[in-house]
Image (spheres, helix red, strand yellow):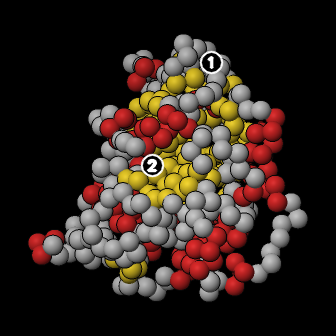
Amino acid sequence: MGIDTLRWPNADYSRVPYSVFLDPDLHAIEQERIFRGPVWLYLGLDAEVPNPGDYITTVAGDTPVVVVRALDGSVHAFVNRCAHRGTLLVRNQFGNAKDFTCVYHHWCYDHTGNLIGVPFLRGLKGKGGMPKDFNLADHGLERLKVEVFASVIFGSFHAAPESLGTFIDRPMCEWLERFFAKPIEILGYTRQRIPGNWKLYVENTHDGYHAGLLHQMSTTFGLFRATEDGGIKLDKGNRHEVTFSIHASDKIEESKEAYRDTAWFEAPHELKDPSVFDFIDEYGNNMAANFCTLFPNVIFQQLANSLATRQIRPRKWNEFDLYWTYFGYQDDSAKLRATRMKNANIVGAAGYSSMEDGEVGRLCQIGIKGGANDHSVIEMGGLGPIGTQYTTVTEVPIRGMWLNYCKLMGIPVANAAAA
Ligand code: FES
Ligand SMILES: [Fe+2]
C-alpha cells in the first residue's frame, strides 16, 4: 500500500494501520513531509558548542547536519555534505575548527557554510581551472534555519516554518525553561540502534499506559507506579506531550491492590545497591519521572536525577538510532552530581528502566510482520476528545500523535464524512 492509497481507518485515531511501520517507501516520504517539512527539529544543546568554532555533527531526520558556533557567537546549522560532489564534510562527532575542509578535493567552508576556497580555482600553469564565471558565493552549504530556545538548538529546513515558540507551545515552553533554567554541563553520550520503526518509539513516549507495567524495575523499587498521581499534558495541537508523576503519592495498600496479580511486586526483591534509585527533589515538585516529547524527534528526560535528551535518528523504515546526551547543572553539589551519575544506570541502551522501550520496539516490528492489513487498538483512556490526561493510565496522547502525523503526511481519514 502506498501513501496515495493509504486511508486512516477511523477519525478518532484509535486504530493505527501496521502498514505505517512496514512500508519501506514511507521513510522517504516522511523525510520530505515531516523532517524537511514545517517542523522544528532538535539538533543539540547550546552547551555542546560553547566557544567560537565549536561544532557537533548531528542529523535532521536522516540528513547529516553540522551545528557550529561562529566567531560572533551565533549558532548555525548546515547539511554535512560538500557542495562539490556530496562527500560527508565533517567526520568527527564534535570538535573545534577554524573552517571546514573537505577531504576529497579540499573545498573549504567557513562557520556559516560559505564556500571560501577551491584549490586550483584558476588552474595550474595556465591549464585547467574552473570556468571564469564560477562564483564561490553560489556554492555554499545547504543551510537550515536555526533558533535556540532555553539552551536547546532547533533547526528547520522549511522556507517559512511557524515561530519556534508557537511550534513548541504551552506547557512545553515553560517545561523547557524550567529544565534549562541554569547553565548545564554535558556529562556524556550513549547511542543505540533499535531494529524498529522510529514511530514506535514516539508512540512509546506518548504512552503512559505501559510505564507502570513494562518498567518493572521502576515499579518494584518505587521510582514510578501507575497508582501515583500524575498525567500527560498536551499542547493545543496535541502533537507534543509532558508526562509527570508525583513521587510516592500513592498509598502502599492501593498499589499492592492495583498490582496484586503481578507476582514480582510481592516477591522479596532487593537491590544490592539501592542508591541507584536515590532521588533528590531538586525542582521542589516531588516528580521523580518527568518527561517532555516534542514531535517528531526529541525527548527530554528527568528520571530521578538523571537528565538527558534523546534524539530520534530514523535510518530506514525498520531501524532508527536513539542518541542520548546526558547533562547536569554547572552548580551541582557533589552529592547531586554523584546521584545523577548513579541514576544514569536507569536509562540509556541498557538502563534498568529504559532498555525495555527499545526492546518492545524491536518486538513490535517483528510481531507486525505480515500484518500490513491489520492495525493496533488504542483505546485506553477512552475514545473521547484528545487532550490533557490527569492519569498516566492512558493512551489518548498517542491518538494526538497520529492525528498530527496524518496532518503532516497528508493522509486522509477513511470515513471522515461520517465522523
Ligand atoms: S567532494 Fe568535497 S571537495 Fe570535492
Ligand atoms: Fe517506557
For residue 414, the mark is none
**Amino acid type of disc 1?**
Pro
Q: Position of residue 408 (x, y in %)?
A: 30, 55
Q: Furthest-top residue in view? A: 72
Q: Position of residue 303 (x, y in %)?
A: 64, 52
Q: Earlier in the sequence, mark 1 or mark 2?
A: 1
Q: Position of residue 151 (x, y in %)?
A: 54, 30
Identify whether 417 is placed above or below 135: below
Q: Furthest-left residue in view? A: 417
Indicate yes or no: mark 2 CB to ligand 2 under 8 Å: no
* 415 relative position to 276: left or right: left
Q: Is residue 37 visible?
A: no
Give the quadrant of the N terminus: bottom left
Q: Is residue 12 visible?
A: yes
Q: Residues within 10 Å of mark 1 (few under 14, many from 20)?
A: some
Q: Position of residue 362 (x, y in %)?
A: 59, 73
All told, the count of numbered labels is 2
For residue 294, the mark is 2
Identify whether 120 is placed above or below 32: above
For mark 1, what is the residue? 52
Secondary-structure class at tag 1: loop
Residue situated in front as seen by the camera: 54 or 382: 382
Q: Nearer the viewer, mark 1 or mark 2?
A: 2
Who's the residue at 65% across and 40% down the image?
282
* 114 relative position to 273: left or right: left
**Amino acid type of disc 2?**
Leu
Residue situated in front as seen by the camera: 294 or 397: 397
